[in-house]
Amino acid sequence: MTYIFTNRLNQNVNWLKKIFNKFSVVGIVFLCGTINTFAQSYSGGGGTSGDPYLISNKADLKYLSENSGEWSNYFRQETDITFADADFQSGGDFYNSGSQFIPIGNNSVNFTGRYDGNGYKIINLKINRGSSDYVGLFGRVSGSPGEVKNLGIEVSNIKGNQYVGGLVGYNTGTITECSIVDALIDGATHAGGLIGRNEWQIQRCYSTGLVIGGNRLGGLVGTQSATGTTSNSYSSVAVDDYASQNIYGGLVGDNSGGSIAYCYANGDMTGANNNSRGGLVGNNGGVIWPSYWDTQTSGTSTGVGSGAISSASGKTTAEMKTQSTFTEWNFVTIWQIVGGDGANYPDLISNSNSALPVELVSFTGELVGNAVELNWETATETNNFGFEVERENRGSGEWEKIGFVQGNGTTNSPKNYEFTDSELPNSEEVSYRLKQIDNDGTFAYSKVVTVDLTTITSVKDEVVYEFALEQNYPNPFNPTTTVKFTVPNEGDEYIRPLQTKLIVFDILGREVATLVNQKLQSGNHEVQFDGSNLSSGMYFYRISIGNEFNSVKKMMLVK
């Protein structure tokens, strides 16, 4: 169970705002009187590391992009989000006088929060800002934490002037396991398929599509400074120029002092001029660890247009599809060649396109005391040998096996699994994934689950309980679900009971069930809610503990 430090809600009807997740509600009378009108913001969450704002639709993205005061918060995407062409045309919500989507972050106010795509995608994004700098879904990202991860962008059309990228225009943060697919990126200078300019860290990312522009163009990154690093990434982007200037690279346009490690490029470079054109890097003033480019698909035998070639090697297409070509690369936890040698180019194991052979219904993690409990459920399994549980090493960015859970072979009935990690790292959060292995040895990876560790605490060798109301599980549910909550300690008094009331009510504020109404000892508690006699729809559950704590969350009953 995750222990969440929650502010005491002492002001009027603040808890009512949470009931409706800031949806606009006018003139509803419930318990405390009239609820004021609240502007829409997000689909849920509190904007913190342990309780990020939930991005579930275009309206959530619109609010985020238009409100710079939100750009230091934490976000998690909950589903694929697809734009329609009409959204960007006159009268559409994202027209903005023809400039289309407003980048999240700019040179004045950077995005300094964390956006976790959660393995989902944003599709058909359009930005038309040819005279503007810092252009991308994120205009400018910077540290503390300044992170975008686990996000894919497909079929995008993005135009800007300087510092233009499919994901980020200008990056001084951390970009992990992100992808750009079938993008058209158009920038006058410093333009890349993923990032326009990188000054910090890119890892396990890839891009496909077309980059056009004037100068310093790259399939993945336009320019990279001396502090920038790009590792375990690739580009299949074609690069073309319209200014007949210089510095174009299949992976990075201008690597002015940064490092490139374990990367490759196979995009078409024949459209770019011959001045400082490289199949891997246009101009290199930094360090390149074993990296490769396809001499056939790129149309050039030159890997680095100017500067030190370092450890860049050109290979034929057949060699690029052979694992033994990539010396020193990690083909255990980072890279794979799907189908074996000769079938495909290397792909990232973390690539969200690599679906699990089993039908995975859910995969969650929560903090229980000083350990993390992982739970997952499958709907069906075919030849499932089992699951290796992997934890990310925050220092190296690589994954390590911490356990194994036996599978159920072939079954058409739901199966539940659990694993406890009691040897937690000394960090603010920890990430996990499942490596599902078939009986024939083939395997694939789940999406990543991240758990907040900042609430681990203890006093006098006793567990210290803090106020907490958790999200019900499963959610959506039919017809039963479990609600977990925590009754806190009062200082050193570990046995003092507190009056606790947990009720369920519908969207109109009508109480439909009382789950708890009694004094409870401090500790972790759970109760089951049965919605058999209720109709499908959204409901809310509210807990009151003593006179100190109120919290509300929503649940969805689907029949």
Image: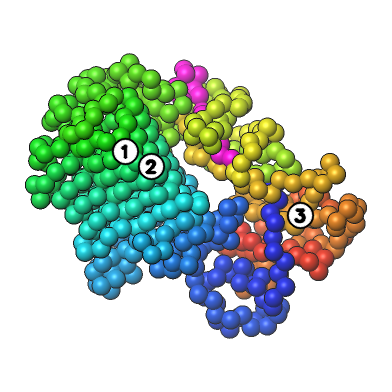
Mark 2 and mark 1 residues within 8 Å of each other at the beta carbon: yes
In which quadrant will I find the C terminus? Answer: bottom right
The residue wearing badge 2 is 227
Distance in Å between CA atoms under marks 2 and 1: 7 Å
Residue 383 rendering spot, x and y as whole percentages: 50, 23
Q: Is residue 287 left or right of residue 463?
A: left
Q: Residue at x 38, y 34 (%)?
A: 231
Q: Is residue 138 above or below residue 62?
A: above
Distance in Å between CA atoms under marks 3 and 1: 48 Å
Q: Secondary structure at mark 2?
A: loop
The foreground one among 122 and 402 is 402
Q: Residue at x 36, y 30 (%)?
A: 261
Q: Earlier in the sequence, mark 3 or mark 1?
A: 1
Magenta range is 430-443
Is residue 195 rendered magenta in the image?
no
Distance in Å between CA atoms under marks 3 and 2: 41 Å
Dominant SS in magenta: strand
The residue wearing badge 3 is 466
Q: Identify residue type, mark 1.
A: Gly
Q: Residue at x 32, y 63 (%)?
A: 101
Q: Secondary structure at mark 3?
A: loop
The foreground one among 19 and 245 is 245
Q: Earlier in the sequence, mark 2 or mark 1?
A: 2
